[in-house]
Amino acid sequence: MADTVAAGILLAQALARREEQKSQVLELLGKLKATLDTSKYFVGSVKTYHPHQETPGETSLTQATNAPEKTLVQARSWQLVTKLLTAIGDHWDVNATIEEGNTAAFVDVTLEDGSVLLPHVPVTLLMWLEKQLARLEDIFKSIPTLSGDKEWQWDANENMYATREPKITVKTQKVPTSFILAPANKEHPAQAQRIDVDKEVGHYRLVEKSGAIPESTHEALISRVREVKLAVHDALHKANTIEVEQKGIAKPLFAHLLAPLTEIGG
């Protein structure tokens, strides 16, 4: 059920707060959308060299050449989305307060399974919700998903996904070897030629990292926001004129929308 907002706020105060927040919220949505559309923030990797055996006389220069290569994942998509919804929650609640103070038309927002997600919502707020949910759907669509051509597993130590099986590539080096062109006989010594042969001396182990989410989670998020959009649309046709108390909507609504993200890392 929706949380009840603390009583006592004047409508004028709520209107002033909404105007102060409006441009800030739009800016936050725009910045996050741009970030989610930039894939480089959510990819990383760790590449390490593993010799098959210790090389005698290995120099510090050789060690430096084979030093680990690491590209950090700059952002975790699910954390950014959760942080955004936390930041804009009060703005949604303020709008709920204003709209309920301006109208007496209320109706329940009921999901397809018959459960009431948001009870007793004013019709003017339903109209506002319809627009905001469209924006959230656009945000959810932009959340990057894990590459389907790799097998991923959760890395609890780094709080992100990593490829299940590392990619192994071989490292070789040229090794001088004598090649017998003609064996020795009574009249001539053996004829040999020195050639360089590629010898396997080690391997690289590449583990890819990602701040994206599974495709199934991505689909579940989009499905849920569309389900709520449909429920809000249907509720607009059932509104009646009555008077009710002010309510907060952000907490239960966002908890429902982000439920698939709670499974991240599980």
Image: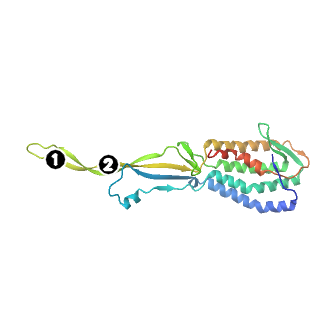
Instruction: Give me the residue at 85% from left, 53% from top.
Output: 99
From the top left corner, tell me how far across and down residue 106 is, in percent. 87, 46
**10 and 262: which one is in front?**
262
Q: In the structure shown, which secondary structural element does the residue marked by tag 1 occupy?
A: strand
Residue 114 higher or lower than 88, as above or below: above
Q: How many marks?
A: 2
Crowding near the residue tagged with mark 1, few <14, some 14–19, many ≥20 C-alpha atoms within 10 Å: few
Q: Amino acid at mark 1?
A: Gln
Q: In the structure shown, which secondary structural element does the residue marked by tag 2 occupy?
A: strand
Instruction: Give me the residue at 74% from left, 61% from top.
Output: 23
Measure the C-alpha gap from mark 1 to mark 2: 22 Å
Q: Tell me which corner region of the image, top left, top right, bottom left or bottom right, holds residue 12.
A: bottom right
Q: Amino acid at mark 2?
A: Asp
Image mark for residue 198 = 2
Q: Which residue is mark 1?
A: 191
From the top left corner, tell me how far across and down residue 222 is, in percent. 68, 44
**229 and 89: which one is in front?**
89
Instruction: Give me the residue at 73% from left, 49% from top.
Output: 254
From the top left corner, tell me how far across and down residue 64 is, in percent. 41, 60
